[in-house]
Amino acid sequence: MVVTGEISLHTHGDGDILDITAKVEKFVIDSKLTNGIVTVFVNGSTAGVTTIEFEPGVVADFQKLWERLAPKNITYDHDGRWGDGNGYAHVRASMLGASLVVPFADRKMTLGTWQQIILVDFDNRPRQRTVIVQVMGE
């Protein structure tokens, strides 16, 4: 069986990181499926999803990482073409990735103790984001 739904989120942009673990877990529980996988997918080209330990130190380290890997203050061809100044956001999002798959057993995701699912919005402005959640199993 497959159950699909959406999580709607408002973000502040500019590297905003949101813990969406509880929202995803609710989808798993509400699906009434016992064992399977849950896929989390953000349908935008300037945001991504992954897992981290969602605590202030790791969050700060994670945000600093992106500035080292794809700095805001360099030239991006995307900005020259579109003039929206978010070329770095597209590059960062593509490096992080738009989806994540987590197994679940007995209606509980198999995340580690210090592992949370996060959405990262790299865009240079606040956004309304949609995260697609698809639960598959038995």
Image: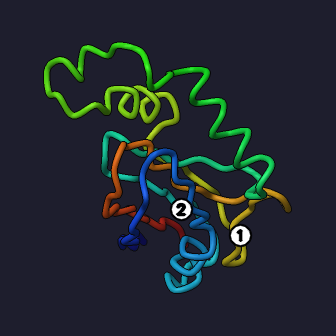
Residue 2 appears at what percent x and percent y?
40, 69
Mark 2 element type: strand
**Where does label 1 land, which residue?**
105
Residue 76 appears at what percent x and percent y?
32, 16
How far apart are labels 2 and 1 at the CA level? 11 Å
Left or right, 107 with respect to 18, comes to right
Residue 58 appears at what percent x and percent y?
77, 46
Q: Nearer the viewer, residue 24 or 106?
A: 24
Q: Residues within 10 Å of mark 1 (few under 14, many from 20)?
A: some
- The residue under the point 52% across, 35% down is 96
Q: Residues within 10 Å of mark 2 (few under 14, many from 20)?
A: many
Left or right, 109 with respect to 101, comes to right
Q: Amino acid at mark 1?
A: Ala
Q: Earlier in the sequence, mark 2 or mark 1?
A: 2
Mark 1 element type: strand
Residue 122 appears at what percent x and percent y?
44, 42
- The residue under the point 53% across, 67% down is 137
- The residue under the point 62% across, 56% down is 102
Q: Nearer the viewer, residue 46 or 124?
A: 124
Give the vertical position of 110 relative to 51 (above or below).
below
Give the vertical position of 74 relative to 132 (above or below).
above
Q: Amino acid at mark 2?
A: Val
**Where does label 2 land, which residue?**
38
Q: Quadrant of the N terminus?
A: bottom left
Left or right, 10 with respect to 15, comes to left
